[in-house]
């Protein structure tokens, strides 16, 4: 029996596979490698290169690897990009989740964990945000995920699927053992800042908006370490195997840091100043997103280990150092 992890060659999916490996679980990674990298997925997991919307490939994978549970990460996640290319997001997120669920129903796979996002809340009226807050997505990304949540709820009710949906907040950091981390272009604050701190990018950090209604004027986010997020999914897996049912939970630490406070964390960790420039706000960025995490702590008994912004920054910097060394080695080998 195996657990299928979609997007298993990506940032969060790779950490999920490591958590399954550490727990002695058999896993299969499915990824089309459009943004992921084959080497990022641990060798202990079987690997299938396929699109999550390819129902024939999914059914073949379910049968060949005796898949009984799915943990779904595959999708597009960049807010600004979703505003520029909304149809791509509805296709890659919503339509592909529909196809994945259809394959699950066909194959009799009845345990499902969906990695969703706090973006479904849009600009919340209250903070911290509880799970019963209104769903008012302000971007195609958030809307595509909210639609996927509804499709999952309806499929579960009709076909007896047990599921946990985890609405995660701002995922950051890297595996403390250096086995995985974020790759690709630096589209998120902490990855971009880590590259600047190491001198890998000769530019100032771009801060989008210094006039938000927050104490220092910059946007506030609830940063959750990627390993803690993976462990939340492990706890969700235990729930669908045991108690079953259907539930949606926030995954965050219940505290927020402003952009300037993250910059301060880099200063503490590196002992150097972080050059930055303040520009206009980006469309789709609410002033603050902080999780009310009482439910996940109670329902899943989730106890995060890495609730420390300095530690998150340290692991992000160390990963960028390892990644740069890997890329340098690759360039040297290819030039020989």
Image (cartoon, helix red, strand yellow):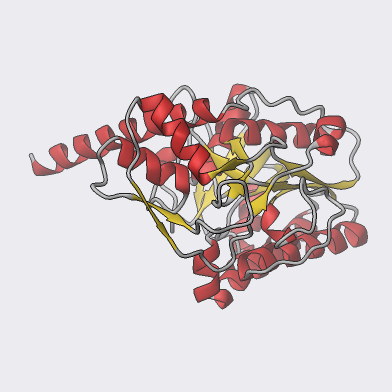
Q: In which quarter of the image is residue 252?
A: top right
142 and 73: which is toward the camera = 142
Dividing the image into 4 quarters, which one contains the N terminus? top right
Which residue is at the front of the view, 8 or 296? 296
Q: Is residue 104 or residue 318 the one in the foreground?
A: 318
The image shows residue 86 at horizontal and vertical percentages of 57, 75
For residue 176, say whether it is visible. Answer: yes
**Residue at left 80%, top 44%?**
249
**Residue 39, quarter of the rendered image:** top left
Residue 243's quadrant in the figure?
Answer: top right
User: Is residue 299 rendered to the left or right of residue 315?
Assistant: right
> What residue is drawn where x is 50% and y is 35%?
173
Q: State the image coordinates of residue 162 (x, y, percent, origin top left).
A: 86, 47
Q: Is residue 134 left or right of residue 21?
A: right
- Name the residue rendered at 61%, 37% in the picture: 224
Locate residue 76, reporting x and y percent.
55, 61
As drawn, is 121 to the left or to the right of 6?
A: right
Residue at the extreme left:
336
Q: How many numbered discs, if any? A: 0
Residue 180 visible in the current orientation: no
Q: Quadrant of the C terminus?
A: top left
Where in the figure is residue 257, as x and y percent of width and height?
A: 59, 40
Seen in the picture, residue 296 relative to 219 is either above or below; the reply is above
What residue lies at 74% left-to-right and 63% top-to-bottom? 146
């Amino acid at each position: 029996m195996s657990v299928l992890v979609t997007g298993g060659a990506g940032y969060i999916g790779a950490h999920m596979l490591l958590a399954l490996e550490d727990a002695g679980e058999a896993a299969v990674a499915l990824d089309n490698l459009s943004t992921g990298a084959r080497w990022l997925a641990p060798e202990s997991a079987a690997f299938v290169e396929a699109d999550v919307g390819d129902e024939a490939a999914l059914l073949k994978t379910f049968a060949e690897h005796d898949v009984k549970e799915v943990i779904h990460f595959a999708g597009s996640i960049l807010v600004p990009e979703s505003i520029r290319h909304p149809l791509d997001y509805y296709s890659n997120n919503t339509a592909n989740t529909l196809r994945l669920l259809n394959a699950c129903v066909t194959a009799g796979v009845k345990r499902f964990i969906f990695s969703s996002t706090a973006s479904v809340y849009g600009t919340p009226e209250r903070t911290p945000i509880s799970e019963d807050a209104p769903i008012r997505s302000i971007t195609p990304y958030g809307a595509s995920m909210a639609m996927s949540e509804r499709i999952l709820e309806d499929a579960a009710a009709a076909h007896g699927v047990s599921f946990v949906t985890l609405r995660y907040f701002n995922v950051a950091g890297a595996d403390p053992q250096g086995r995985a981390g974020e790759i690709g272009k630096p589209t998120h604050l902490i990855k971009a800042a880590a590259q600047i701190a190491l001198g890998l990018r000769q530019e100032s950090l771009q801060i989008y908006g210094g006039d938000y209604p927050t104490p220092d004027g910059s946007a506030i986010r609830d940063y959750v370490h990627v390993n803690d997020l993976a462990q939340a999914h492990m706890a969700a897996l235990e729930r669908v195997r045991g108690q079953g049912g259907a539930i949606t939970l926030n995954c965050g630490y219940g505290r927020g840091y402003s952009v300037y406070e993250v910059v301060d964390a880099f200063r503490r960790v590196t002992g150097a100043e972080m050059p930055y420039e303040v520009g206009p706000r980006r469309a789709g960025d609410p002033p603050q997103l902080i999780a009310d995490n009482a439910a996940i702590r109670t329902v899943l008994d989730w106890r995060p280990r890495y609730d420390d912004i300095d530690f998150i920054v340290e692991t992000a910097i160390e990963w960028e150092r390892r990644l740069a060394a890997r890329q340098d080695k690759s360039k040297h080998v290819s030039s020989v």
